[in-house]
Image (cartoon, rainbow, N blue to C red):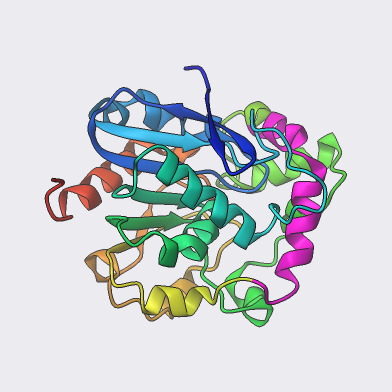
């Protein structure tokens, strides 16, 4: 599947689009990843049924890096890209699916996406600010790699392995390639921004969302605390609980794509009809 390009503000954003024609699904990858991570979904039954749109965030995958000092490498910056992307591709009524950083971007952008049908996040513990981070995330030393500019191959390999369930037999070569191909400034500038408070209160966003929200979680997750997720106040939480995916770690789209796709299909089928 080849990339297409769309102009969002003054940025060229690369994306992949599946062949389905039913309700659009926008897929947002994580830190130091790319749209490649969604290939199983794009090429599978859900992609053949739905119009799945997987973008490369700026400085990731095939999307060029923004101008230095532009502020794009931040949650508000990425959220602006997402809202512009949705508008440019006429997907305002999409289901918004965010993995890891992508889930944080989805929550940051939620208020600016009033027509989105629903939200699905995984690998994403909503936080109200820096004080929540120690409880929301597990004490994994590889987490810091996601906020480090210069990452060598060994650090990239450790980070990739932490995205999977412990002892996973899945190859990490593509994960490592995505990490090493990411603009180093994307990690360092994001980390600097997260140390402050220049982003939305995600806990409040979840509590006041007003639209269906699915929170998924890999049973063998190495970055995110399930106990923390259970404490969230989420009135519109799908099925009333966090949905745990057996056999998956931080990246179920790579590890258990069929199970993830089934949950997405069930979530979409529970939404009001797509007109």
In the image, residue 42 lies at what x, y percent? 39, 28
The magenta span reads 175-198
* 91 relative to 59 in the view: left or right: left
Which of these two is toward me, 144 or 67? 67
User: Relative to residue 83, is residue 260 drawn left or right?
Assistant: left
Residue 202 coordinates in the image, percent (x, y): 51, 73
Residue at 61 percent of width and 71 percent of height: 199
Relative depth, front residue between 81 and 34 = 81
**59, above or below 203, in the image:** above
* Image-quadrant location for residue 217: bottom left
Q: Is residue 186 magenta?
A: yes
Check the image and report above or below for 241 versus 208. above
Q: Overall secondary structure of the magenta stretch?
A: helix
Measured from the top left, where is residue 50 in percent x and y? 26, 33
Residue at the far top in the pictured view: 1
The answer to whether 105 is drawn above or below residue 158 in the figure is: below
């Amino acid at each position: 599947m080849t990339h297409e390009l769309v102009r969002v503000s003054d940025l060229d954003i690369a994306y992949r689009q599946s062949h389905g024609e039913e309700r659009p699904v926008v897929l947002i990858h994580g830190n130091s990843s790319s749209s490649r991570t969604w290939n199983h979904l794009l090429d599978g039954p859900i992609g053949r049924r739905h119009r799945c749109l997987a973008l490369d965030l700026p400085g990731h995958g095939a999307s060029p890096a923004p101008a230095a000092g532009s502020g794009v490498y931040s949650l508000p910056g990425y959220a602006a890209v997402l809202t512009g992307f949705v508008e440019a591709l006429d997907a305002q009524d999409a289901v918004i699916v965010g993995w890891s950083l992508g889930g944080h971007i989805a929550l940051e952008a939620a208020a600016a996406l009033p027509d989105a049908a629903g939200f699905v996040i995984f690998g994403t513990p909503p936080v109200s600010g820096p004080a929540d981070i120690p409880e929301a995330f597990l004490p994994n030393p590889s987490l810091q790699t996601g906020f480090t500019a210069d990452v060598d191959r060994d650090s990239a390999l450790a980070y990739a392995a932490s995205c999977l369930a412990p002892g996973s037999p899945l190859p990490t070569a593509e994960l490592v390639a995505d990490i090493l191909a990411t603009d180093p400034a994307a990690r360092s500038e994001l980390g600097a921004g997260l140390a402050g408070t220049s982003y939305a209160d995600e806990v409040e966003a979840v509590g006041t969302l007003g639209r269906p929200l699915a929170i998924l979680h890999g049973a063998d997750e190495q970055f995110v605390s399930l106990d923390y997720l259970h404490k969230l106040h989420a009135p519109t939480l799908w099925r009333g609980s966090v949905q745990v995916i057996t056999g998956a770690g931080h990246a179920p789209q790579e590890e258990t794509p069929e199970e993830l796709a089934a949950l997405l299909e069930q979530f979409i089928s529970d939404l009001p009809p797509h007109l």
